[in-house]
Image (spheres, rainbow, N blue to C red):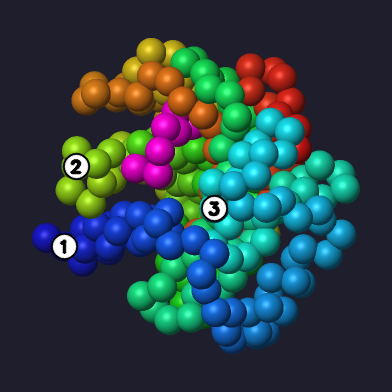
Amino acid sequence: MTNVDLHRVRRAARWRLAAAVVGVVTLTAAGSCGGEEAVERWQEGAAHWDEGGVHGDWRVIFDGGGFTGRRPDGTILLAPPPPESEDVTHAGLIVSTGTTGEPDLRMRLRTLDQTRPEPNVWEVAWAVWHYTGPQNFYYLLLKPNGWELGKADPAFRGAQRFLATGPGPFPIGRWYEVRVRQSGARMTAWVDGRKLVDYTDEQDPYLQGAVGLYAEDAVAEFASVSLGGHPLRG
């Protein structure tokens, strides 16, 4: 197995850790500011959403011990605290209260900050759909070095399948317009109006679930989120 493969298996294990261990963290120094300061720096003016709570069309699955909430302009903020060590991760996830079989998901997203001193490329804002649990969903992420379409699937080693990847870059701090459609097993994704990928999942595709917003060891914002042309509000 290559080093890249090892990284990917470890990454999937860390996702499961983030889903299982929520809210029990100690905020410590990371980067240029302390943990509490790092979280508070981004949350000013935003209304806090409690973990496990329902806020309009959204349910907070976990906040990683950090801050999840909504800015006055409707922008959603996920700000988990910085990790205390290399083998620790903190993440935030919210999902829609409703489900759909053929999503047409649109949003603007950006990664404001990567909180690990030496970040991993996947520690950015994620778009999620057909979510039925922390090991069952599709995702699209825009990394500094490219994009990735994937599937969380416990039937595979590391509970993760990498469906398609492509070049970038997608710099941290920029807004991106993302659209994802799925019809049956076929999914198509666009960024800033440009088609990234057209992919058909031929191995037990997910055909129903919630849509979601996720950030792992990163501070992320999501705006103008809609499903089938209908805004999802908090």
Q: Amino acid at mark 1?
A: Thr
Residue 41 in view of the camera: yes
Can you give x and y, in whole percent of width and height, for residue 26 in the image? 55, 79
Mark 1: few, some, or many residues within 10 Å (few <14, many ≥20)? few
Where does label 3 land, which residue? 62
Closest to the camera, between mark 1 and mark 2, is: 2
Q: Name the image quarter holding the N terminus.
A: bottom left
Measure the C-alpha gap from mark 1 to mark 2.
17 Å
Q: Main secondary structure of the magenta part?
A: strand
Q: Are marks 1 and 3 in contact (CB under 8 Å)?
A: no
Can you give x and y, in whole percent of width and height, for residue 205 in the image? 30, 23
Where does label 2 land, which residue? 156
Q: Nearer the viewer, residue 24 or 2?
A: 24
Closest to the camera, between mark 2 and mark 3, is: 3
- Magenta includes 144? no
Q: Amino acid at mark 2?
A: Phe
Q: Are marks 2 and 3 in contact (CB under 8 Å)?
A: no
Mark 3: few, some, or many residues within 10 Å (few <14, many ≥20)? many
- Assign a secondary structure to mark 3: strand
Is 141 rendered above or below residue 87? above
Measure the C-alpha gap from mark 2 to mark 3.
24 Å
Measure the C-alpha gap from mark 1 to mark 3.
32 Å
Q: Earlier in the sequence, mark 1 or mark 3?
A: 1
Q: Residue at position x 43%, y 20% from top? A: 208
Where does label 1 land, which residue? 2
Q: Quadrant of residue 223?
A: top right
Residue 108 in view of the camera: no
Q: Amino acid at mark 3?
A: Phe
Q: Name the image quarter holding the C terminus.
A: top right
* Range of residues picked out in magenta: 129-135
- Assign a secondary structure to mark 2: loop
Q: Earlier in the sequence, mark 2 or mark 3?
A: 3
